[in-house]
């Protein structure tokens, strides 16, 4: 029933009544760019409808960001090919099995049979389930926890790309999301962004760093609060607006987060990079589920605010699109976007609802209570799924938000007054009348809300990284330390790094510290990318210079010019004492940089696209996907126009035949009546002995022949109509096949990325600083 529609960008949502039977409800996925709301009380079937929508998006290769405060949406990851009971058994409710006196495997067999029957009744088969399982690339993120994949939210407030810095509105929105999210984490989510000193200071600190292209971590941000890099906020002196004593209180609150044992979990994992979470490097769509059930209210608000801010940032770097490029789904929005309060997350969500359509980004919000949504948000939603509601007041709120005249509201109110479970009213801004439908059977197994233990079981074990075997050079055991620093004939700078306790003698060992500059240059690609690097190499006991073993430092640590008087020193390695000039060290370092430092140049030859300098594979993959979408949309529109013209021609012919058929049927009726009357008159003349018998009989025969001919004409018209119906079916199938061929042609899998490595020129490598570091 559904196979012909799989390639037509349609979501199969359920079934609707039509006459005495049911027909599938197929909804254009592009309509989700005008956003959607799912409303319904507990037991109405909201979760099933939401998961069904997300499954359709996966089948249509649409990437997803799913915010899951309760843990229900993780059920998307429970798709079992073939509905194998043994694979399903670990997800059975042991309590249910025990209460019924059966094993969990027997319960799994029952559930598998139930799911198979449900799929078949809704016109879906195991092949559709298998296709969904193959396409679904689902990652469950657990910010602040190691149960799933971690998210590095607090590790760095990364500077946005130049496109965002140049867009004043988006830059301001990102600043607002970052600052209000951070303040919500310390319980200050009511900060007035116009006058609140904490808000103003944090916003200006981030702005100052980002405009210079610098990322800020929590340590740097706390330090900047105490000693800001500026002395004024606007026209007023900083000390007047926010004295140091008050700034120190803010710094202490943020430091309390850093000092918390749970802080490390917020800095480990993948960066909050929306592009990487939506697409693989090859351009394949991903599903990112953010499980938040383990967090408290402040932590949830903080994360949602940060995520929405980064989504706005990603969105504004994309080209415009009329097709559905990505979908944000949020389950249970209670408390996030209320009409009576400006929460930290609200500004970014309102921006998405107003602007996301132009970029092909859709938003779906689910809630039990329509009062959870700001009335301004309701006016930006084009699709409504309304299930059973708790009170008449809830229905009135929905009717007010949807709009329409009194008759439309009355019709809609009557439809939603007594809805059974798993039944919804679909109200679309694109349709004149609401549609009543029952949701389809979902492909995923609905276990119920997932726990952290469930998330751990779902988490895919990452294979250990295999490092190539490298010969390890044995280091000689350091000789006994001396109280006097060993002499060095080599004329380079020396410095000290003493981190030992003040009450204990310091024992110093030698290391090399180097600051290097180099650049990647390619005139043909327009690449000129300067780079800097700080290297630390421990040479205590080394038998040779091994720059390959050096560590990369983010910055040069604070150094001292002298050592403690009571300190001891390890001897210098013999190879270093023999050197008279630093040229050998510098030459070896330059050779090392030339050998190991490369810039990955990405190119998609089939599209003629080159990645920008330092553009990540994920970002370039998203750019390729956007270009493929653009070309597909262009060709698909041409194809649709061509076949729509053919369809109009056939339908016009069909309507003319319908009119002709009505006329022929009327002629048959008239001819049959005339023939019957003529036959009666002929019989009358026969029995009356009239002289008109022969004439009447002849006329009657002619009328009978005309009636026969008219019936033959009806049959001929009906045959032509039947042939046209078959042609229209074949035309639809041909269109679907050609559209699927277009989709395949513009699939990222058919447009591979080539990689070329660019090395820095040796003439562009310079050693800016080289010193012997005595560390303790």
Image (tube, helix red, strand yellow):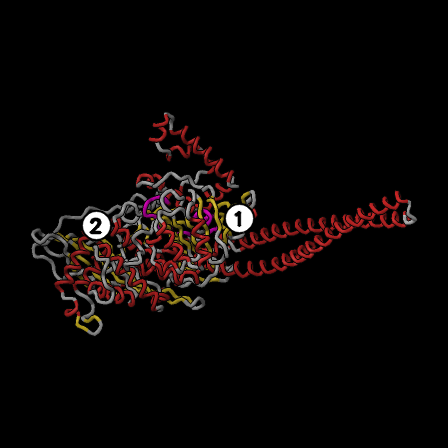
The residue indicated by pointer 1 is 6
- Name the residue carrying label 2: 541
* SS state under label 1: loop
Residue 191 is inside the magenta segment: no
Q: How many marks?
A: 2
Q: Is residue 475 visible?
A: yes
Q: Give the percent coordinates (x, y) of residue 182.
A: 25, 57
Viewer-proximal residue among 422 and 548: 422
Tell me the magenta residue range.
53-72
**Does 64 lie within the magenta span?**
yes
Left or right placement of residue 749 versus residue 458 in this view:
right
Give the quarter of the image for residue 620: bottom left
> At 14% from the left edge and 62% from the top edge, which residue is drawn?
246
Checking the image for residue 242, the label placed there is none
Q: Quadrant of the N terminus?
A: top right
Q: Are marks 2 and 1 in contact (CB under 8 Å)?
A: no
């Amino acid at each position: 029933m559904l196979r012909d529609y799989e390639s037509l960008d349609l979501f199969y949502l359920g079934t609707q009544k039509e006459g005495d039977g049911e027909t599938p409800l197929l909804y254009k996925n592009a309509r989700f760019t005008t956003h959607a709301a799912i409303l319904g009380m507990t037991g109405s079937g909201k979760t099933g409808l939401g998961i069904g929508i997300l499954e359709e998006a996966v089948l249509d290769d649409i990437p997803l960001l799913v915010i899951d405060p309760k843990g229900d949406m993780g059920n998307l990851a429970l798709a079992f090919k073939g509905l194998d009971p043994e694979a399903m058994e670990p997800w059975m409710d042991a309590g249910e099995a025990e209460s019924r006196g059966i094993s969990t495997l027997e319960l799994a067999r029952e559930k598998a049979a139930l799911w198979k029957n449900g799929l078949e009744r809704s016109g879906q088969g195991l092949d559709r389930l298998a296709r969904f399982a193959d396409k679904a690339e689902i990652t469950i993120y657990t910010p602040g926890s190691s149960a799933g994949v971690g998210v590095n939210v607090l590790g760095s407030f990364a500077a946005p790309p130049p496109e965002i810095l140049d867009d004043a509105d988006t830059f301001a929105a990102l600043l607002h999301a970052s600052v209000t999210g951070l303040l919500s984490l310390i319980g200050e989510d009511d900060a007035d962004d116009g006058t609140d000193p904490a808000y103003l200071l944090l916003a200006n600190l981030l702005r100052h760093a980002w405009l210079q292209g610098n990322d800020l971590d929590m340590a740097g941000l706390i330090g900047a609060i105490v000693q800001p890099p500026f002395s004024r906020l606007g026209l007023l002196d900083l000390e007047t607006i926010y004295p140091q004593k008050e700034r120190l209180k803010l710094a202490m609150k943020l430091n309390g987060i850093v000092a918390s044992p749970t802080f490390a979990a917020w800095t480990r994992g993948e960066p909050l990079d929306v592009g990487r979470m939506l697409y693989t490097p090859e351009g394949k769509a991903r599903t990112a589920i953010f499980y938040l059930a383990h967090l408290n209210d402040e932590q949830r608000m903080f994360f949602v605010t940060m995520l929405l801010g980064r989504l706005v940032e990603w969105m504004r770097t994309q080209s415009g699109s009329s097709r559905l490029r990505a979908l944000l789904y949020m389950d249970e929005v209670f408390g996030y976007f209320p009409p009576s309060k400006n929460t930290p997350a609200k500004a970014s969500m309102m921006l998405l609802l107003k602007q996301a359509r132009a970029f092909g980004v859709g938003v779906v919000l689910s809630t039990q209570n329509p009062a959870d949504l700001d009335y301004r948000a309701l006016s930006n939603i084009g699709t409504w799924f309304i299930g059973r509601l708790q009170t008449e007041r809830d229905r009135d709120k929905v009717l007010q938000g949807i709009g329409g005249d009194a008759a439309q509201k009355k019709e809609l109110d009557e439809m939603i007054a007594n809805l059974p479970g798993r039944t919804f009213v679909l109200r679309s801004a694109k349709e004149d009348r609401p549609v009543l439908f029952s949701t389809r059977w979902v492909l995923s197994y609905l276990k119920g809300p997932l726990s952290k233990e469930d998330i751990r079981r779902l988490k895919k074990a990452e294979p250990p990284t295999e490092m190539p075997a490298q010969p390890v050079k044995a280091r000689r055991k350091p000789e006994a330390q001396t109280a006097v620093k060993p002499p060095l004939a080599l004329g380079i700078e020396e410095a000290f790094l003493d981190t030992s306790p003040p009450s204990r003698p310091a024992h110093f060992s030698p290391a090399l510290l180097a600051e290097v500059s180099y650049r990647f240059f390619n005139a043909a690609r327009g690449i000129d990318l300067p780079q800097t690097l700080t290297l630390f190499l421990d040479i205590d006991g080394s038998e040779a210079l091994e720059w390959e073993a050096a560590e990369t430092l983010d910055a040069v640590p604070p150094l001292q010019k002298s050592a403690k008087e009571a300190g001891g020193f390890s001897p210098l390695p013999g190879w270093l004492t023999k050197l008279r000039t630093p040229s050998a060290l510098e030459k070896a370092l330059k050779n090392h940089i030339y050998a190991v430092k490369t810039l990955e140049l990405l190119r998609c030859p089939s599209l003629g696209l080159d990645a920008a300098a330092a553009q990540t594979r994920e970002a370039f993959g998203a750019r390729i996907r956007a270009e493929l979408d653009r070309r597909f949309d262009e060709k698909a529109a041409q194809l649709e126009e061509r076949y729509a013209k053919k369809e109009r021609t056939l339908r016009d012919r069909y309507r003319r035949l319908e009119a002709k058929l009505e006329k022929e049927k009327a002629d048959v009726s008239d001819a049959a009546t005339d023939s019957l009357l003529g036959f009666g008159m002929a019989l009358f003349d026969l029995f009356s002995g009239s002289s008109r018998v022969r004439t009447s009989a002849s006329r009657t025969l002619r009328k009978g022949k005309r009636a026969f001919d008219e019936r033959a004409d009806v049959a001929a018209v009906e045959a032509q109509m039947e042939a046209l119906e078959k042609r229209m079916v074949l035309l639809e199938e041909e269109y679907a096949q050609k559209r699927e061929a277009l989709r395949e042609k513009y699939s990222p899998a058919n447009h591979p990325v080539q990689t070329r490595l660019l090395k820095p020129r040796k003439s562009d490598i310079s050693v800016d600083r080289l010193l012997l570091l005595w560390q303790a």
